[in-house]
Image (cartoon, rainbow, N blue to C red):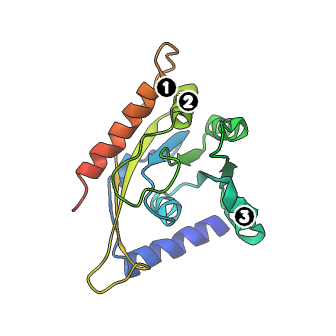
Amino acid sequence: MFYKFCRSLFRFFFSVFCNWKVKGVENIPQEGPLLVIANHISYWDPVVIGSVISRKVYFMAKAELFNYPVFGALIRSLGAFPVSRKQIDRSSLKRALALLSEGKVVCIFPEGTRNKKGDLLPFLPGAAFIARKASVPIIPIALQKKRRPFGNRFFPHFFVNIGRSFIIEKEKQRDLKDDADKMRAKVRALIDFSIN
């Protein structure tokens, strides 16, 4: 209930104050496990994606965010779970796989950090590992944020481009980097066809 309330509130906010545009929402399956991958350009990204998708989304978020008692408890209640960026975090990988096995929606930002410059950073192998291990539909999403003529940095124009689903097959002979590069290419293509 609280999650749905927050989603409705932010949908209103993005529509009225940020004039957001969403393309490809019909590509999102309404049931079954789903792995969402997206570029990471701002702190708003999880909120934007959570508002676009009508199902509850479980986000893999950097562990440092959970060090703040109130904020950490809030995002945990909304479905976020921590991941350490300093090493291979097996517990977060297991958590993501467990959620997918339950038919849930999991979102990962494979760059591993925010990239304000706009171009994509290399995708980390953890996302490829989850994609291969779970072998579930993957939805690529490209996010863009632009300053508005009469707005400010708190009310930017958001554009969300949602691609068609694809699957990474369970093929152990292939290098994880190849899978990570394939996932990156899917998001890259969506950015190239977004508005400028």
Q: Earlier in the sequence, mark 3 or mark 2?
A: 3
Residue at 61% of width from left, 40% of height from top? 103
| Disc number for residue 72 | 3
Quarter occupied by residue 3: bottom right
**What residue would you read off at disc 2?**
129
User: In terms of secondary structure, where does tag 3 sit?
Assistant: helix
Q: Earlier in the sequence, mark 1 or mark 3?
A: 3
Residue type marked 2: Phe
Calculate the distance from the C-alpha at mark 1 to the C-alpha at mark 2: 7 Å
Mark 3 Cα within 10 Å, few/some/many (few <14, many 20+)? some
Mark 1 Cα within 10 Å, few/some/many (few <14, many 20+)? some
Residue type marked 3: Gly
User: In terms of secondary structure, where does tag 2 sit?
Assistant: helix
In the displayed orientation, state which residue is furthest to the top: 173
Residue 102 horizontal/vertical position (percent):
66, 38
In the displayed orientation, state which residue is furthest to the right: 69
Labels 1 and 2 touching (C-beta < 8 A): yes
In the displayed orientation, state which residue is furthest to the bottom: 150
User: Left of 165 or right of it: where is 114?
Assistant: right
User: Left of 93 or right of it: where is 107?
Assistant: left
Residue at 48% of width from left, 45% of height from top? 36
- In this rendering, the answer to whether 155 lies above or below 44 is below
Labels 1 and 3 touching (C-beta < 8 A): no
Depth check: 149 or 76 in front? 149
Quarter of the picture containing the N terminus is: bottom right
Labels 3 and 2 touching (C-beta < 8 A): no
Residue 42 horizontal/vertical position (percent):
46, 64
Residue type marked 1: Leu
Residue at 26% of width from left, 83% of height from top? 149
- In this rendering, the answer to whether 176 lies above or below 97 is above
